[in-house]
Amino acid sequence: MWPARGGTVSTFRRALCRVSRLPTLVAIGACLFAIGLHRAGSAADQPQWGQRFTRNMVSEETHLPDSFDPETGKNIKWSVVLGSNTYSSPVIAQGRVFIGINNAKPRDPRHQGDRAILLCLDEQTGKPIWQLVVPRLGEDDPYLDWPRISMCSPPTVEGDRLYTVTNRFEVVCLDLEGQRNGNDGPYLAEGQHMVPPGEKPLDVTPFDADILWLFDMPSQAGIYPHDGAHASILLDGRFLYLNSGNGVDNTHRRIRKPDAPSLIVLDKKTGRLVAQDAEHIGPRIFHATWSSPALAEINGQRLIIFCGGDGVVYAFEALPQDFQSSEVAPLRLVWKFDCDPTAPKENVHQYITNRKVSPSNIKSMPVVYRNRVYVTVGGDIWWGKREAWLKCIDATGRGDVTHTHQLWSYPLKEHCCSTPSIWNGLVFVADCGGYLHCVDAETGQPYWTHDLEGEVWASTLVADGKVYVGTRRGLFWIFKADSTKQLLARIELGDGTASTAVAANGVLYVTTLSRLYAVAYPQSQPAAISQTPVHETGK
């Protein structure tokens, strides 16, 4: 009898200790054995992007490789071809791996042409189980749903339910079993949903996803979609918190829906809109709303930490679990922090393409760590100034804390869309200038940097005492997670990556634009951080 996948030692320990009619010493020994198993390796699922609530890009997984080689297969458990232009990061739960892909390599011959797909794979083998296929939103306007990219939003899994945002800016609740156990409803229009408007619905097969409910943000929340939908849903009890994706139109100089919310809250059982922000962020959005929220408990108060498309960090009261309202409620603001207070605040779109003076925006997620919020912010990658920072904010304030609660600010290279990893008093973060930074979490003082030889859109992952990060050029780097720089491996992936590495159940998942690798030591091989010179592949 082994602990359930993703379970905690306490559950297993209690089960062992309830065994009746066993001698006391045997029972005690069994309990200690269970605790020892847990301490030997913290194998667990990774059911959302980043740590639950805090969004910290840190995993407790151990026994992860400090090198691998895609060419020779060294330390590769399995790999699968995905398609092309994969910008999602994988999520691992309940024996399955979920990853957003495109339709460059169709798995169902009925679906031809440009589609975004959420693919469900078997965790042990990489074999496909089911897929959610979604046509493009705007064939006449590519800026409504950027062509040929993957479904970008990493899903969030709880029990037998999966919550995610499609390329059409729909929030969907899916059955983890797909259609293999029937079409559960109440949503029953999967056959129509998987084809472009006006086309005849397809028959639903066991290889198709099972949508339980669907919330369409453009029509039901009043947002205007832009580029690729990207939201990692924050699940808190009854409620789903997510960024709406509201953004500019195809001119990049106009917000068509200035009154639309930037942060919304849905009931996880029904998909009903429960609450939304009332901060009127819309007119100040420089590009779009891509940052997903975190949850913090500060001095006994639970706060939703959200970064707007205006470069401002907002802290809202989290809804109590017994909250009831027949109307869409406004979220109550506790504090806000403008990350770039001297940047333009009015008529912001006149600064489009200005690489010296522009508003800032936030594409990464805020990370909560010891009553602080860490966030990367700066000029827009495509349209803004070439300045970016890692900011540390005291999260205990009230009101406008812009000029009172910044603890430190650290300059980054050019632009940044990476979420930080904070571990053992150190912050690890990469940037679009192609550098990895190691910074003191308390003071913001740098320990070291490293030129990664390519632009980084992914986030770092810290796990098993190592830092993992990949570049758009196709290099994957592994460092020791320490204040003294030690490079463990420089690996050529053969394709670029914009996805964050993920660790779960003793396996490291590395995603390129076209392939997913499950990286693990062979079971017979001992795992330890290498003290040998750097391992390089492709040389």
Image: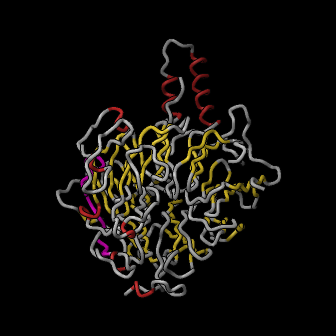
Res. 124 image quadrant: top right
Q: What's the magenta bit mostly, secondary-structure-wise?
A: loop
Could you tell me which residue is drawn at 56 percent across and 70 percent down?
Answer: 416
Say if 501 sits above or below 217 in the image: above
Q: Residue 248 or 275: which is nearer the viewer?
A: 248
In reply to whether residue 278 is colored magenta, the answer given is yes
Could you tell me which residue is drawn at 37 percent across and 76 percent down?
Answer: 250
Q: Residue 6 or 399: which is nearer the viewer?
A: 6
Q: Residue furthest right?
A: 533
Q: Residue 67 or 329: which is nearer the viewer?
A: 67
Could you tell me which residue is drawn at 59 percent across and 22 percent down?
Answer: 30
x and y, in percent, of residue 459 in the image: 57, 60
In reply to whether residue 452 is colored magenta, the answer given is no
User: Quadrant of the image for the C terminus?
Assistant: bottom right
x and y, in percent, of residue 460 in the image: 60, 59
Say if 232 sits above or below 191 in the image: below
User: Is residue 297 something one can see in this rendering?
Assistant: no
Q: Residue furthest left?
A: 326
x and y, in percent, of residue 444 in the image: 63, 70
**Which range is magenta?**
268-280
Say if 523 sits above or below 441 in the image: above
Could you tell me which residue is drawn at 45 percent across and 67 percent down?
Answer: 396
User: Is residue 366 something one can see in this rendering?
Assistant: yes
